[in-house]
C-alpha cells in the first residue's frame, strides 16, 4: 500500500527554544502585538510502502526513535494517510 | 599511540585531526571509513572529528550516529578505549548516546567562530588528567553547541562536566559563554570517563603559528596516560 | 527494492520556433538570422534554447570580450602562469611543484532575489570552478555591496547573504578568511555578491575542461537535474531588472554543500588515479549546455549525449529543460574509454549519482537524443564562438561637474573628533566582526592571519620538503573612486589590493577580477567598463602581475539606475617561509614603538569616505596614483618586513590616516593609544582624512628607526615618523613646520572602540 | 479571544530539499527500504489573541508573508484553534 506519512517533531516542554523566542520577539517588533509564545518544530513528510496503516505506524515509530527525533529533548507525533 | 580518526560523509576536520596527531605529535594514525564495521587494527584511541556529517541535516550528528562504524566505536568505548569527540564529533557521540545530553542551536541562532577559553574541571579522563584548573584557549566554530541536559542538577552531581567556558582570567561569566550552554558546559565525559566530547577544537590549537598551542594539552595528556600503561 | 521510482523524460511535441520566440529568448533579429544561416534550417525548440544561452551575455561575454583581450595574462618576470583566463580558474606556479588556483565570480541577481540561497550557491559555484581544475580549495573571500544602510531591504539582504556564504563555506569546510563589505545607495536595487576561492594543486596535475579522445565516455556526476534556474544565465543576467516584473524569475536554486563536499572528495580521489580522467567541467551557468559545448569546443571534438540517461529529480521534464537547468552540484567529465567502472566505483563510494550519458565524437557537432528522437544537432563552433560586439561608448557628461568639485571649498568641521568617530563608525569602515564571526575561518588548520587582523589573510601551505609557505590573499574595490574616475579608480583598485598583500609581507603574484557594471547597451556604462579594464591592465603591467582569471557581471541596473562601476580585484601573493618570516599584522603591538608613514601626505579628499559621511558628497578628483611611488613604497615595506624591522603594517584606504591609525589602535593584541605630532602645511581635516594613494603606516622599535630610515633613503622612498604607540587615546597634534602645534583630536580608546565595534550593528541588527 | 495557531512551512514543489534527500537515503540505509521521498518543513506553534478565527487567519497570513515563511521558495498553511 502506498502511504504518505507526516511526522511532527517538537521540543519537549521545558527545553528552551531560542528560535521560537526570536520569532515571537520579531513578530511583536513588526507590530503583531497579539502574539504570545512561539515554538518551532520540524515537520517531515514521507512516502512509504506498507501492508497497512498500523504496520506503517509501527515502522514510523521506529524511524522516529532511531533517527527522526532525538528523544532526549524532542517529542514526536505521527500521522499516516493514503498517498495524495 | 595509534589514532583512528573517523571519516563520515561531510566530516571536514578529519584531516585536521590527523594533522594534529600525526604531523604535530608524531604519532601513527589515519582515517577510518564510516561504512566499515571495524576500526583499523591496533587502534589505541578514536577521534570523532568535527565537520558537517550529513550536512548537519535533520540534527547535527544524527545520521552519522547511525553509521556502521559507530557500532565499532561503541564496542571500543565499552572496552575502555579512549574516544574523543570534537565539535560535530561531540554531537555525534551524544546522538549515539555514548554521552549524555544534547547539543542544540546556539542561543544567538548564529554560527560562531572565534577563540574561547575553557577551564578544565574533571580530570578523571585520559584527556584531562592533571589538567584540572588549567584555562585553555581554543577556537570554536559551530551553530549547534548549546549543551542541554534533561536533568542538569543530577548530571552536575556525577562530576562529568570536564570543560566549562570561562573568561581569559578563568572566571565564569555570561559573556564568556559563546552559545548559551547550560552551566557554561563546553565538554563532558561518560560514566567511565574514557569517552570525552567538547565543542572547542583542540586540533586547531596545536601550533603557535595558528594562534594557540593550548589544545595540545589534551593530546599530550592522552599520550602520557597511554605511555603510563593504558588509558582506561 | 527501492521505494524511489526513477524519474524519466516525457515526450511532448516541441513548440514551433518563430522569430518572435527567438526574440523572447533574448536573440536579436541579426543573431537569429545568423542561426538560420549556419544551420540552413529553422532550429528546433531545444536548439533555440541552447543557442540562446550560449550566446547570452553571461556565457559569451559578447559585450566585453574584445576589451578583456587587452588584459595582461601571460607569464611575467615575477609570475609563471600555468593557466590563464579561459578555463574554469587561473593557475600560477608557487614553487616546489605546487600551484595556486583561483578565481572570483559574481552571484548578484540571485542574491538579490533570495539572499541566503543566492549567496550560498555563489560560493558553491566558485568552489566547483576551482576543484574542477584539480585543486583542493583552501580559502574563500567575498566582496559585498549593499544599498544604503537605512534602506528597508538592506538588513534582510545583509543577514541572508552573510548567513548563506557562511552556510556553504562552513559546511563544505573551506575557511572564509576575509573580504570586504560596503554600502551605498547605488546598490539599493542591485546588490553585489562576489565570491573568491583559492585552491592548491600539484603543478603537474592540472585538469582542464576538454572533451577529447574519440569514443571516450561522458559522465554525469552529482545532484539530479531539476527545473532550477532555467533561464537564469541567459535572461536574468543579461538584461536589466524591472521592479515588480518577475515573470521570468527562474526557480531559485537551493545549495547543497553536503553533496558538494562529497563531489569535491570524489573528484580529487578520481584525479589521483593516473590517466583516468581526461577532462572535467562543472555545470554552472547554462548547466549541461555550456559544459558540454565548451568541453567539445576546447578539444575541437564533438559530443553526443543520450538525455534519457541524465539523472532527474522531477517528473515530466523535457530535453529543453534538462539542457537549460542550472541545478547545482553537478559535474560533467570525460574519462578514459573502457575505464568507466573505476570512476563509477569512486562515485558509488561517496554515495553520488553518476551515469554515463554520452561519448566524445569527432564530428564538430553536439548531438542530443532522447527516446529515439534527435532533439539537437548543432555545429559546436558557432555556438562557442558566440556573438561579439564593439558597443558604442561615451564619457558620461556628469563627470565634468563631479570632478570639478573642490573639497577645499568646504569648511573644516567644528568637531573633528566627532567627524572621526562618524567615519570610523560608518558601516563601510566599521569592524566586520559581525560578518566573519559567522564564517568558519579556521577549518583546515592553515589560517595564519585571520579576518580583522591585517589587510590581507594568510593561509599556510606546506611544501613537499616540509617548509611552511604562506599564501596571502585579499579582495578590494574602492567603487566610489571608480565611479568618479573609472580609469584612475581601477588603477587605484589594483594598487590598493596589492598593497594589502605587501602589508602582511607577501609578494603579490597574480590577479583575478570580477567586473560588475550596469547595462552595457548604454554608451556611458560601456565607457565605464572600457576605462576600468584599461586601468586594470595598466596597473597590472606596472606591478608586473598577470590577470589569470575573472568574471564579468553586466546589467546590474534597476529601473534605469546602474550600480557604481565595481571592478573587484582579488590578488594572491606568496610568503616564501612563514617560520623565518612570520606575516605582519596591522594592530599596534606595544607601547613605545615608533609610528612611521611610508608615503606622502597630500590633501586629496575627492571621493573620500569623509566627504560622503561628514559632508554627504560623492565628488571631486580622485587621488593621483604615481606608479613609481607605489612601487617604491611596496618595495620598502617588503624589504623592511623581510629584514625583520617591522612590528606592524597597515594600508591606508577609506577614511585616510585618521581611520588607519584608529584601526591600528584597536586591532592589536590589546587596544592601545597613540601620540601623533606632525608638522604639516595641511588643514587638519585634510591631514586626517585625505585618501592619498600609496601609503602604509608601520611601526618599528625605536632602535630600528635608523635602519628603516636608511632603507628608505636607499630606495628613495618617503618615510615620515609620526609619533609613538602608547596611552589610552589617539591624540593628534598638528602645526606648520617651525610653528606652534595644537591638539586637533584626542579621542579616548573607549570611544574609538565603541564606534568601530558597534558601527556595523546598525545595518545588521 | 485566546487562540492557538499552527503554521506549516514547506518548500515549494520542485525546489530542491537536500535535507529531505539525506534523510530519505539515511532511512533506507538503516533498513527502512519502504521509504521513498522525504521532505522536511517547519512547524510553528503560536499563541495569539484575536477577535475571532477569521481575523486571526488574516493576521497569520500577514505574518507568514512578512516573516514566518520565505515565499520565494516556501509555501505555508495555517491552522487556527482554541487554545489548548
Ligand atoms: N565579507 C567579509 N568576509 C570576511 N571578512 C571580511 C569581510 N569584510 C571584511 N572582512 C574583514 O574585515 C577586515 C577589515 O576589512 P576592511 O574594512 O575592508 O579593511 P581595510 O579597509 O582595512 O582594507 C579585513 O580583515 C577583512 O578581511
Ligand atoms: Mg578595504
Image (cartoon, coloured by chain):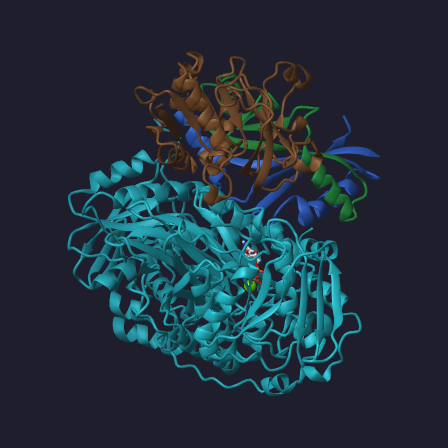
Chain colours: A green, B brown, C cyan, D blue
Residue C298's x, y, as percent?
A: 25, 63
Q: Residue at x 43, y 50 (%)?
A: C459
Residue D30 shows in the view: no
Residue B153's x, y, as percent?
A: 69, 17
Front residue of C427 and C128: C427
- Quadrant assignment, res C230: bottom left
Residue C607 shows in the view: yes
Specify the quadrant that holds the N terminus of chain C.
top left
Residue C420's x, y, as percent?
A: 71, 66
In the displayed structure, does residue C74 sit left or right of residue C186?
A: left
Up the image or down, C36 lies above or below C182; here it is below
Front residue of C56 and B223: B223
Front residue of C668 and A55: C668
Up the image or down, C617 lies above or below B227; here it is below
Up the image or down, B231 lies above or below C556; here it is above
So how many labels did they put on this image?
Answer: 0
- Quadrant assignment, res A18: top right
Q: Quadrant of ligand 1?
A: bottom right
Front residue of C754 and C286: C754
Residue C50's x, y, as percent?
A: 35, 62
Q: Residue at x 31, y 55 (%)?
A: C99
In the displayed structure, does residue C446 sit left or right of residue C525?
A: left
Amino acid at each position: 500500500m502506498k502511504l504518505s506519512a507526516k511526522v511532527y517533531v517538537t521540543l519537549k516542554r521545558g527545553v528552551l527554544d531560542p528560535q521560537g523566542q526570536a520569532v515571537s520577539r520579531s513578530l511583536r517588533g513588526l507590530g503583531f502585538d497579539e502574539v504570545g509564545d512561539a515554538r518551532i518544530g520540524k515537520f517531515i513528510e514521507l512516502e512509504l510502502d506498507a501492508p497497512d496503516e498500523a504496520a506503517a505506524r509501527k515502522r514510523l515509530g521506529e524511524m522516529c526513535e532511531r533517527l527522526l527525533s532525538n528523544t532526549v529533548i524532542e517529542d514526536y507525533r505521527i500521522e499516516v494517510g493514503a498517498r495524495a | 599511540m595509534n589514532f583512528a580518526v573517523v571519516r563520515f560523509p561531510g566530516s571536514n576536520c578529519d584531516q585536521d585531526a590527523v594533522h594534529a596527531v600525526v604531523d604535530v605529535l608524531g604519532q601513527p594514525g589515519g582515517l577510518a571509513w564510516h561504512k566499515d564495521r571495524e576500526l583499523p587494527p591496533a587502534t589505541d584511541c578514536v577521534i570523532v572529528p568535527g565537520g558537517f556529517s550529513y550536512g548537519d541535516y535533520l540534527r547535527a550528528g544524527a545520521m552519522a550516529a547511525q553509521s556502521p562504524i559507530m557500532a565499532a566505536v561503541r564496542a571500543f568505548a565499552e572496552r575502555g578505549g579512549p574516544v574523543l569527540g570534537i565539535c560535530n564529533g561531540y554531537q555525534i557521540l551524544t546522538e549515539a548516546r555514548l554521552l549524555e545530553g544534547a547539543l542544540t542551536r546556539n542561543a544567538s541562532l548564529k554560527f560562531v567562530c572565534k577563540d574561547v577559553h575553557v577551564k578544565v574541571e574533571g580530570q578523571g579522563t585520559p584527556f584531562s588528567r592533571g589538567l584540572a584548573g588549567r584555562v585553555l584557549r581554543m577556537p570554536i566554530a559551530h551553530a549547534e553547541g548549546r549543551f542541554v541536559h534533561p536533568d542538569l542538577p543530577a548530571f552536575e552531581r556525577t562530576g562529568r562536566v570536564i570543560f566549562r567556558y570561562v573568561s581569559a582570567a578563568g572566571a565564569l561569566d555570561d559573556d564568556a559563554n559563546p552559545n548559551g550552554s547550560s552551566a557554561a558546559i563546553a565538554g563532558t565525559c561518560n560514566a567511565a570517563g574514557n569517552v570525552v566530547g567538547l565543542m572547542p577544537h583542540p586540533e586547531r590549537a596545536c601550533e603557535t603559528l595558528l594562534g594557540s598551542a593550548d589544545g595540545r594539552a589534551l593530546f599530550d595528556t592522552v599520550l602520557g596516560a597511554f605511555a603510563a600503561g593504558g588509558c582506561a | 527494492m527501492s521505494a524511489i521510482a526513477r524519474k524519466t523524460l516525457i515526450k511532448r511535441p516541441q513548440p514551433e520556433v518563430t522569430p518572435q520566440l527567438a526574440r523572447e529568448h533574448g536573440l536579436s533579429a541579426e543573431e537569429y538570422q545568423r542561426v538560420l544561416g549556419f544551420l540552413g534550417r529553422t532550429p528546433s525548440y531545444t536548439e533555440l534554447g541552447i543557442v540562446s544561452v550560449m550566446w547570452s551575455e553571461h556565457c559569451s561575454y559578447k559585450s566585453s570580450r574584445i576589451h578583456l583581450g587587452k588584459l595582461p595574462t601571460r607569464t611575467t618576470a615575477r609570475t609563471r602562469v600555468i593557466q590563464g583566463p579561459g578555463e574554469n580558474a587561473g593557475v600560477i606556479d608557487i614553487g616546489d611543484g605546487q600551484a595556486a588556483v583561483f578565481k572570483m565570480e559574481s552571484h548578484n541577481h540571485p542574491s538579490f532575489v533570495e539572499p541566503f540561497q543566492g549567496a550560498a550557491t555563489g560560493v558553491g559555484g566558485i568552489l566547483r570552478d576551482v576543484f574542477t581544475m584539480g585543486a583542493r580549495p583552501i580559502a574563500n573571500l567575498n566582496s559585498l555591496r549593499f544599498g544604503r544602510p537605512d534602506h528597508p531591504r538592506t538588513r534582510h539582504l545583509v543577514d541572508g547573504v552573510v548567513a548563506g556564504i557562511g552556510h556553504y563555506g562552513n559546511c563544505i569546510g573551506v575557511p572564509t578568511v576575509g573580504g570586504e563589505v560596503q554600502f551605498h545607495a547605488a546598490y539599493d536595487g542591485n546588490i553585489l555578491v562576489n565570491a573568491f576561492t583559492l585552491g592548491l594543486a600539484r603543478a603537474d596535475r592540472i585538469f582542464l575542461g576538454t572533451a577529447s579522445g574519440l569514443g571516450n565516455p561522458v559522465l554525469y556526476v552529482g545532484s539530479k537535474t531539476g527545473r532550477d534556474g532555467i533561464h537564469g544565465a541567459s535572461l536574468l543576467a543579461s538584461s536589466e531588472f524591472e521592479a515588480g516584473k518577475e515573470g521570468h524569475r527562474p526557480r531559485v536554486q537551493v545549495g547543497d554543500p553536503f553533496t558538494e563536499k562529497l563531489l569535491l572528495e570524489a573528484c580529487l580521489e578520481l584525479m589521483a588515479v593516473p590517466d583516468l580522467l581526461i577532462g572535467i567541467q562543472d555545470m554552472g551557468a547554462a548547466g549541461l549546455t555550456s559544459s558540454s559545448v565548451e568541453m567539445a569546443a576546447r578539444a575541437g571534438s564533438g559530443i553526443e549525449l543520450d538525455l534519457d540517461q541524465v539523472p532527474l529529480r522531477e517528473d515530466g521534464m523535457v530535453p529543453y529543460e534538462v539542457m537549460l537547468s542550472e541545478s547545482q552540484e553537478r559535474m560533467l567529465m570525460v574519462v578514459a574509454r573502457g575505464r568507466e567502472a573505476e570512476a563509477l566505483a569512486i562515485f558509488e563510494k561517496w554515495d553520488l549519482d553518476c551515469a554515463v550519458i554520452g561519448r566524445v565524437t569527432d564530428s564538430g557537432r553536439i548531438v542530443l537524443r532522447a527516446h529515439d528522437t534527435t532533439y539537437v544537432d548543432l555545429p559546436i563552433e558557432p555556438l562557442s564562438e558566440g556573438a561579439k560586439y564593439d558597443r558604442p561608448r561615451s564619457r558620461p557628461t556628469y563627470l565634468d561637474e563631479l570632478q570639478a568639485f573642490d573639497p577645499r571649498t568646504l569648511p573644516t568641521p567644528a568637531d573633528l573628533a566627532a567627524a572621526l568617530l562618524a567615519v570610523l563608525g560608518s558601516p563601510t569602515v566599521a569592524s566586520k566582526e559581525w560578518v566573519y564571526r559567522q564564517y568558519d575561518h579556521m577549518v583546515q588548520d592553515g589560517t595564519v592571519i585571520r579576518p580583522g587582523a591585517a589587510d590581507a589573510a594568510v593561509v599556510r601551505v606546506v611544501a613537499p620538503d616540509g617548509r611552511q609557505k604562506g599564501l596571502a590573499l585579499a579582495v578590494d574595490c574602492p567603487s566610489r573612486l571608480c565611479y568618479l574616475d573609472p580609469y584612475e579608480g581601477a588603477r587605484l583598485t589594483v594598487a590598493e589590493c596589492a598593497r594589502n598583500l605587501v602589508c602582511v609581507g607577501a609578494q603579490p603574484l597574480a590577479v583575478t577580477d570580477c567586473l560588475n557594471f550596469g547595462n552595457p547597451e548604454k554608451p556611458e556604462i560601456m565607457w565605464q567598463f572600457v576605462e576600468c579594464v584599461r586601468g586594470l591592465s595598466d596597473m597590472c603591467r606596472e606591478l608586473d602581475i598577470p590577470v589569470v582569471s575573472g568574471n564579468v557581471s553586466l546589467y546590474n541596473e534597476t529601473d534605469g539606475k546602474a550600480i557604481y562601476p565595481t571592478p573587484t580585484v582579488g590578488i594572491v601573493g606568496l610568503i616564501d617561509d612563514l617560520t623565518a618570516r612570520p606575516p605582519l599584522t596591522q594592530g599596534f603591538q606595544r607601547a613605545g614603538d615608533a609610528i612611521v608613514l611610508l608615503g606622502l601626505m597630500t590633501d586629496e579628499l575627492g571621493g573620500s569616505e569623509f566627504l560622503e559621511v561628514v559632508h554627504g558628497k560623492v565628488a571631486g578628483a580622485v587621488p593621483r596614483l604615481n606608479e613609481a611611488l607605489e612601487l617604491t613604497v611596496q618595495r620598502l615595506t617588503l624589504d623592511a618586513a623581510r629584514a625583520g624591522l617591522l612590528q606592524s603594517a597597515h594600508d591606508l584606504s577609506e577614511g585616510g590616516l585618521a581611520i588607519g591609525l584608529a584601526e591600528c589602535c584597536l586591532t592589536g593584541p590589546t587596544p592601545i593609544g597613540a601620540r601623533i605630532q606632525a608638522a604639516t602645511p595641511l588643514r587638519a581635516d585634510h591631514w586626517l582624512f585625505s585618501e592619498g594613494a600609496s601609503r602604509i603606516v608601520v611601526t618599528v622599535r625605536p632602535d630600528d628607526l635608523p635602519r628603516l630610515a636608511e632603507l628608505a633613503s636607499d630606495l628613495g622612498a618617503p618615510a615620515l615618523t609620526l609619533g609613538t604607540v602608547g596611552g589610552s587615546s589617539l591624540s593628534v597634534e598638528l602645526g606648520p613646520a617651525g610653528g606652534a602645534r595644537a591638539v586637533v583630536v584626542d579621542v579616548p580608546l573607549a570611544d574609538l572602540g565603541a564606534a568601530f565595534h558597534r558601527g556595523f550593528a546598525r545595518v545588521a541588527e
